[in-house]
């Protein structure tokens, strides 16, 4: 992906894009991918970095959602299981099967969870990642040495998918870009254009780095801005009612030794009726999440103290070594773009988590809600509106068979896995300069060549882009990321031909961002 080349495409004022997408999270990228699979021309604008919003802050599970099954949302679960299977096939370098263990404390728990998970297995059909089964107390303790043995009856093992969310976003962006889409980060949509009939004809976009503005013409405009969807709906119609209710979920990152083994812990019912996961990920343990209504949509939401206490307290109930604030390597918060509940109700848990496509009178198509797991289907359902909005024919979607950027049958080991077929190219790059072969931080395997690669091939513009979403150090260990920032900024500055002032400004910016991922003890 080359940002300059893509920006140059915007200078052609006569060009009419079939689809202009606002938002570079999983939803917008899913739209771009599906559109290129049908031969449409697409431009995608992301005001910050790809997946800077909710799409880099998920629990990183590709799942049908066992809890949605318990809520009777069978259609949502079936759809997600199908998409889970497709994604594992199309992006094996960014996904994997993960075993989960539900600890059970009595015979009734065993019967109840076993039955539910058998239905889940059955619904997965030929896309199942493995059958669920009951295991004894001894086996549960052997597989998860950190689990509290007191009153434990046994465990139920089941399988779901796991992935690297921001890396997957990047891979989708690269796939769409290579197929002809014009994909751009740091481009903010500032206004919409309409004709005399009040129908949308295009938009204004600003390059957030050069501050240059571009008028864009498009046949269909998609609002895929997640928790920010109402801002675009109101840009289209100042009278538009609010449709989104942000609901915050936080995760704490601990040392993996708190649980031990390779399996993930799934707690199906916490004190307040939620699900809590503790999942091994990139050598650490990601524990979450919460469900807290928030009024404002923010790109960098902050965890509340009560959310941190809740996660620590709940995890402590299941672990022999009780984690404290001092043990937390990083905390990250994300906002779910839930459909706003009807007047009078404030309970987001009751709202269906399935996605919704809204067609406004102006022709604006908004895609809201949903899950990372179903991003492709969400894209397909959105692009299906093209004939209705434009009156033009639409070829069938082929996105379900597209192999995503980096796809390879031979997957590299260790931290190189996420790069797929690019892994060898980055290792070759490291041979060109001794500084690029050096580690960025002594506790992490990442090397300088990954920073250079992120700038050259992955459109990284800022230190945060590299440390947070190209390599995941910020959410794995916020202090390590802070300690690495100077090295990363200098590598980037040399590659991007930037001065000392740029380095200083970047470091100040990153310090501000990273402070939100550190826990005050
Ligand atoms: C705590 C938590 C855990 C989750 N866990 C899972 C999970 O394990 N598995 C799963 O499948 N799903 C999970 N989800 C759901 C999933 O993460 C979200 O559904 C998905 O990421 C939403 O993506 P999005 O593209 O709609 O929104 P976002 O990722 O927020 O993207 C919207 C983008 O629009 C951009 N934007 C806004 N305004 C403009 C503008 N004017 N111009 C240009 N760009 C603009 C923003 O910068 C942003 O990047 C989780 C969600 C949360 C909150």
Image (cartoon, rainbow, N blue to C red):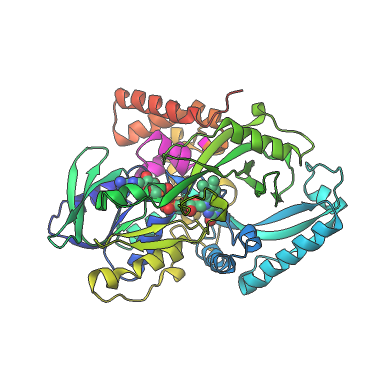
| Stretch in magenta | 449-474
Image quadrant in which the C terminus is located = top right
Q: Residue at x 29, y 26 (%)?
A: 499
Residue in the foreground of this view, choosing between 278 and 484: 278
Question: Residue at point 68% right, 40% down?
Answer: 256
Residue 57 location, x and y as percent? Answer: 51, 44
Q: Identify the image quadrant of residue 199.
A: bottom left
Count of labels in the image: 0
**Foreground of the two, 491 or 506:** 506
Which residue is found at the position 34% from the left and 31% from the top?
A: 493
Residue 319 inside the magenta-drawn segment: no
Magenta stretch, main secondary structure class: helix
Does residue 473 belong to the magenta stretch? yes
Relative vertical location of residue 285 with respect to residue 221 in this rendering, above or below: above
Q: Position of residue 494 (x, y in %)?
A: 34, 32
Out of 66 and 183, give the one closest to the viewer. Answer: 66
Q: Position of residue 502 (x, y in %)?
A: 31, 27
**One can see residue 100 in this view:** yes
| Above or below 496: residue 228 | below
* Residue 257 visible in image: no
Q: Compared to 282, does 162 lie above or below?
A: below
Give the percent coordinates (x, y) of residue 310: 65, 36
Taking the spot 27% from the left edge, 76% from the top edge, the residue there is 393
């Amino acid at each position: 992906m080359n940002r300059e080349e893509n920006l140059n495409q915007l200078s052609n004022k006569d060009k009419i894009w079939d689809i202009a997408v606002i938002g570079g999270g999983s939803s917008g990228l899913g739209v771009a991918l599906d559109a290129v699979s049908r031969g449409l021309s697409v431009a995608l604008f992301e005001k910050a970095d790809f997946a800077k919003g909710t799409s880099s802050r998920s629990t990183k599970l590709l799942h049908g959602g066992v809890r949605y099954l318990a809520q009777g949302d069978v259609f949502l679960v079936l759809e997600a299981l199908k998409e889970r299977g497709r994604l594992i096939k199309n992006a094996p370098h960014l996904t994997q099967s993960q075993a989960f263990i539900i600890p059970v404390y009595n015979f009734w728990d065993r019967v109840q969870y076993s039955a539910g998970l058998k239905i889940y297995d059955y619904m997965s059909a030929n896309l199942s990642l493995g059958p669920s089964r009951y295991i004894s107390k001894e086996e549960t303790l052997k597989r998860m040495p950190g689990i509290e043995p007191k009153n434990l009856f046994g465990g139920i093992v089941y399988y779901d998918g796991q992935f690297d969310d921001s890396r997957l976003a990047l891979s989708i962006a690269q796939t769409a870009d290579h197929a002809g889409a014009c994909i751009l980060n740091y481009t903010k949509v500032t206004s919409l254009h309409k004709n005399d009939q009040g129908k949308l004809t295009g938009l204004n976009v600003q390059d957030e780095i050069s501050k240059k503005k571009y008028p864009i013409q498009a046949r269909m405009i998609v609002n895929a801005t997640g928790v920010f969807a109402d801002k675009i709906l109101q840009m289209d119609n100042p009278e538009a009612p609010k449709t989104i209710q942000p609901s915050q979920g936080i995760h704490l990152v601990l040392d993996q030794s708190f649980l031990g083994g390779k399996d993930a812990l799934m707690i199906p019912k916490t004190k307040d009726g939620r699900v809590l996961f503790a999942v091994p990920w990139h050598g650490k343990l990601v524990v979450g999440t919460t469900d807290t209504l928030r009024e404002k949509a923010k790109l960098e939401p902050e965890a509340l103290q009560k959310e941190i206490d809740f996660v620590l307290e709940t995890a402590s109930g299941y672990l022999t070594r009780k984690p404290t604030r001092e043990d937390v390597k990083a905390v990250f918060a994300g906002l779910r773009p839930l459909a706003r509940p009807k007047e009078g109700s404030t309970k987001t848990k009751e709202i269906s988590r399935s996605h919704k496509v809204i067609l406004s009178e102006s022709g604006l198509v908004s895609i809201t809600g949903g899950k990372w797991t179903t991003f492709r289907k969400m894209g397909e359902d959105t692009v299906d509106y093209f004939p209705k909005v434009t009156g033009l024919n639409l070829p069938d979607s082929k996105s379900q068979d597209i192999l995503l950027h980096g796809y390879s049958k031979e997957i590299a080991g260790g931290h190189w896995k996420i790069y797929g077929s690019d892994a060898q190219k980055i290792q070759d790059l490291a041979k060109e300069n001794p500084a690029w072969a050096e580690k960025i931080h002594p506790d992490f395997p990442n090397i300088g060549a990954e920073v250079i690669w992120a700038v050259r091939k992955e459109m990284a513009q800022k230190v945060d882009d590299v440390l947070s979403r190209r390599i995941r150090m910020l959410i794995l260990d916020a202090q390590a990321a802070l300690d690495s920032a100077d090295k990363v900024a200098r590598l980037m500055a040399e590659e991007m031909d930037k001065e000392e002032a740029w380095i200083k400004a970047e470091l100040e910016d990153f310090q501000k961002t990273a402070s939100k991922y550190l826990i005050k003890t």
